[in-house]
Image (spheres, helix red, strand yellow):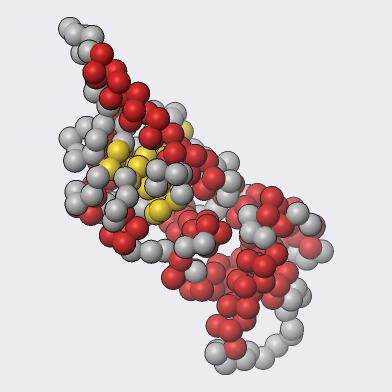
Amino acid sequence: MRYHSTLGLDRDEITELVVRVFQVLEGRPRGSGRPPTLGLYRQVVLVLLYLRQNVPQTVLADLYGVSQPTVSRIYRAVMPLLDQVLCLHEPELTSVFVNRDVLIDGTLVPTGNRADSKHNYSSKRLRQGLNIQVAAAADGTLLAVSPPVAGGRHDRRAITECGWEPVLDGFTWYADAAYIGTTATVPYKRSKYHDLTGYEQTVNKTISTKRSAVERAIGHLKNWKILATGYRGRLRELPNIIRITSRLELYRLGW
């Protein structure tokens, strides 16, 4: 198996993850009953495959020779364990923002259109989802992913609701014109009465060049297809999935 392209992590990273999960389980009382259908390593790989490729559980069941309910039970058992063993790979915002030019952008985690979630409809992207804010360094390295807010939120409001705005106020950060009104360095907007001056055009080009790095970071984050191609599960569970998947990406990057 081409581990990195299929699962997002290489063999050594997966092995380390499995060892950590095993150590957590060793500290818990052993339950009675039948032994698990799949060993721990295959259970972790199954969950990684689900997150990386957003494969339907029925397809995973066929691939692993188990039932769909078994896949669901494995997923619900392993996800909290991954959350626990990866918690140290989510650094404090103040520590990763210091001495850096921080790049910020928002992106939508699509959920499919749901009748009871119209507040998640983004008129910009013409679909429902949850809005997450992404921070990256100037070289495109992912620094942090915010807790999600409703997809209908404008980025200016989302950066406040997720709790990042007061933290960013103490640092130098760059964003697009959606963040006008914050302390971010943003491009000049053209007025219907005045064209941009040569200086303003140069500043906008410089900011646009810098900001391409955060778009690359978002692209790498969304290689975890559960965040990109449409989440099909219970909406109340999606914030946890976003957090765990973000921690997996930070783990992959070596944080």
Q: Which residue extends farthest right?
A: 65
Which quadrant: the N terminus? bottom right
Task: Give the percent coordinates (x, y) of residue 108.
Answer: 44, 40
Q: Residue at x 39, y 35 (%)?
A: 211
Q: Give residue 184's position: percent from left, percent from top.
A: 23, 39
Q: Is residue 81 above or below residue 56?
A: below
Q: Nearer the viewer, residue 207 or 184?
A: 207
Taking depth in this image into account, of 20 and 195 the one nearest to the observer is 195
Name the side, left or right, on which 71 lies relative to 98. right
Can residue 100 be seen at all in this image of the molecule?
yes
x and y percentages locating residue 251 in the rendered image: 52, 62
Q: Is residue 133 visible?
A: no
Residue 113 lies, with reference to residue 39, above or below; the image says above
Q: Residue at x 68, y 54 (%)?
A: 4
Is 168 placed above or below 83 here? above
Residues 228 and 11: in front is 11
Nearest the eye: 237 or 188: 188
| Residue 125 position within the rendered picture, expressed as x and y whole percent measured from the top left | 43, 30
Query: Which residue is pictured at 48% across the width and 73% down the height?
Result: 84
